[in-house]
Amino acid sequence: MEEKAMAVSRRTNRRSMLQLSAAVISTIGGGIVFPSPLAAAPLDELVERARKGGENKLVVAGGTGAYGDLVRNYFFAPFTQATGIEVIVSGGGYGEKLAKLKAMASVGRVEWDVITLSVESLTPDVANLLDDLGACASLPDVSGQGVAGSCLGHGVLFDVGGGVLAYDKRVFQDGQPQPTSWRDFWDVKAFPGPRALPNVGNPWWNLIAALQADGVSPDQLFPLDVDRAFRKLDEIKSQVTVWWKSGDQSQQIFRTREVVMAMLFSGRAFRLRAEQIPLGISWKGAPLDAAFWGLTKGAQHPNAALALLDFIYTRPQAHAAFTQESFGSTAQREAVKFLPEDARASSVIEPANWSQIIQIDRNWLAANRETVLERWNTWLAS
């Protein structure tokens, strides 16, 4: 593998990376045709530094199952074929991975080079476990091809979605008034019917929706006025017939027509559409649901890891194919151009939608998470 890496790295440039990657990427429609890429010496330099440092592999604490297979097929395998650098995946849930990383750091032996975590977990204590990438100057494809905010300082966005307002178009039909905002969600006279909201350990999403329904503008949400949010939630509580506890449950309540509208993970809403259930989707004021990839502090293969972080922001057609197959999305902003026309308007990275996403204030969340969770559980049980 090291010899292969050396041979490929000597010759590789962005054009050859894209050509090599295309072989392992599923096609869209009649097949993928990669456009002529811009010159990109920085990525080549990262690969060259990894080669010179003997970094012929890296370890990623990533996803598992069918999702992990998709990431491997669309990103890891093309990266390896393009660079000769092997990607070894160590899976696990977010909480499990974070606990293991903290344990590794405490003994000074970090075995992972890259870790994938929820953006909401990127609090100051977690950031201390990761390398500071600054403005991602060493990762030009992140800033050059990512949506606004793709560089998080201590990581880069990968999966992106949100808590969308989804409504049943069999009830609120085209040509008639349809709910498009959290204010509408709270308006039970104009839009009658049972509702659903999540109860999956992130009650600040519901607080964000409540405050917007009460007239708070998106740029004034944080710090959240928790008292005001709960007063607004009091108004809608009797109309919320399901506090869903899993993504599967959130889909089932639309299949059985138990509710007419709900806050859903965007990926679940798209899965329902794929089942031919006519859902309307609004991104207005949707809390961001995203995962990021970070370089661990003390990584044994830092240059290889940086090369991977930059590489994943190339090849927009691959991102579009991944989006279609995973029902999710990535932060590669050019990918939307390669989605089928009917999928573009509802894509989170469509500029009109991305601009309406609510970014969670992670410092506020770190300081208030436990207090809000405790209050939420008490309120819900009352």
Image (cartoon, grey):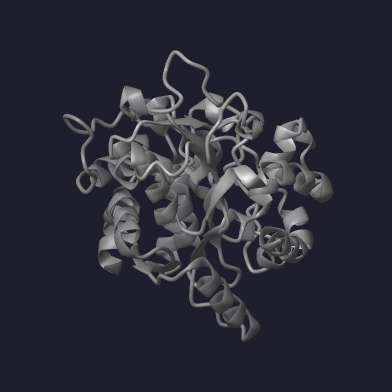
- Report whether residue 89 is seen: yes
Q: For the N terminus, which image quadrant? A: bottom left
Q: For the C terminus, which image quadrant? A: bottom right
Residue 119 position in % (x across, y down):
59, 54
Kindly give the residue lying farthest to the left in the view shown.
Answer: 30
Does residue 295 sit above or below 102 in this rendering? above
Does residue 145 sit above or below 116 in this rendering? above
Residue 142 position in % (x across, y down):
52, 42
Residue 106 position in % (x across, y down):
65, 83
Does residue 167 sit above or below 118 in this rendering? above
Residue 111 position in % (x across, y down):
49, 77
- Relative depth, front residue between 371 and 43: 371
Q: Residue at x 82, y 44 (%)?
A: 228
- Report whether residue 146 is seen: no
Left or right: residue 121 versus residue 75 is: right
- Relative depth, front residue between 81 and 328: 328
Left or right: residue 246 versus residue 14 is: right
Left or right: residue 113 versus residue 286 is: left
Left or right: residue 294 versus residue 316 is: right
Kindly give the residue lying farthest to the bottom in the view shown.
Answer: 107
Q: Residue at x 47, y 31 (%)?
A: 281
